[in-house]
Image: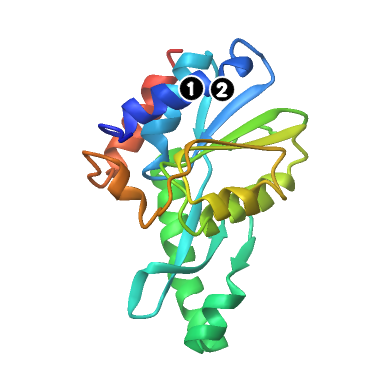
Amino acid sequence: MRFHDRPEAGRILATLLAASADRRDVIVLGLPRGGVPVAYEIARALHAPLDVFLVRKLGVPGHPELAMGAIASSGVRVLSDDILRQLAISAAEIDEVTRRERVELERRDLAYRGDRALPSLAGRTVILVDDGLATGATMEAAVRAARQSNPARIVVAAPVGAAETCARLSAIADDVVCAMTPEPFQAVGLWYDVFDQTSDQEVIDLLNRAREF
């Protein structure tokens, strides 16, 4: 099975999350940017509020698409020891990538949220959504950062994910819902017909539209 695009993937994923519909304690948080169109469809189907949860992948120097870790806006940083060891990446290189990505994290926070604070997560069921789980580094950072706000439950949701990544995330989240865990996995984009980059403006527009739910 392949998804046509992120909205279709979100609608399919929403059917697997139907038990969370019409519950006042549920909040859906999309990981920008690609996770937001998926999360929008889930929030709409569940009649739940939508917001963004800001995380940034830390790309390997010279190979930015390969994640060596991730950061979240709360200061959480998750690193892949295996990648760092295999590629002999220095502490100075890690710190430089982290510094650069924190600047982008702050830019996106201002662009998407302005002076609006993230809603309280305490005691709530938080559904963290991305468009796919490859290494899972950004989602792991999101889960660990969200835990700091004392939610009742954290559910990781993605249309497609590597089986080993979903298994690893199940150790730190309360539930992991993946519509597909194909073997071989290879890359998230292979499981979509349309996988264009999501723009900042699209994220902003979807957040604004979600306020009408």
Residue at x-position 21% and y-position 39%: 194
Left or right: residue 163 compared with residue 168: left
Quadrant containing the N terminus in the rendered view: top left
What residue sits right under mark 2 in the picture? 17
Residue 73 in sight here: no
37 or 14, nearer to the observer: 14
- Name which quarter of the figure residue 127 lies in: top right
Q: Secondary structure at mark 2?
A: loop
The three-letter code of the residue at mark 1 reads: Ala
**Distance from Cα at disc 1 to Cα at disc 2:** 5 Å
- Name which quarter of the figure residue 165 lies in: bottom right
* Residues marked 1 and 2 touching at CB (< 8 Å): yes
Left or right: residue 39 compared with residue 4: right
Question: In this picture, is 27 found above or below 151?
Answer: above
Residue 136 in sight here: yes
What residue sits right under mark 1 in the picture? 14
57 or 72, nearer to the observer: 57
Question: In this picture, is 126 found above or below 196?
Answer: above
Residue at x-position 40% and y-position 32%: 38
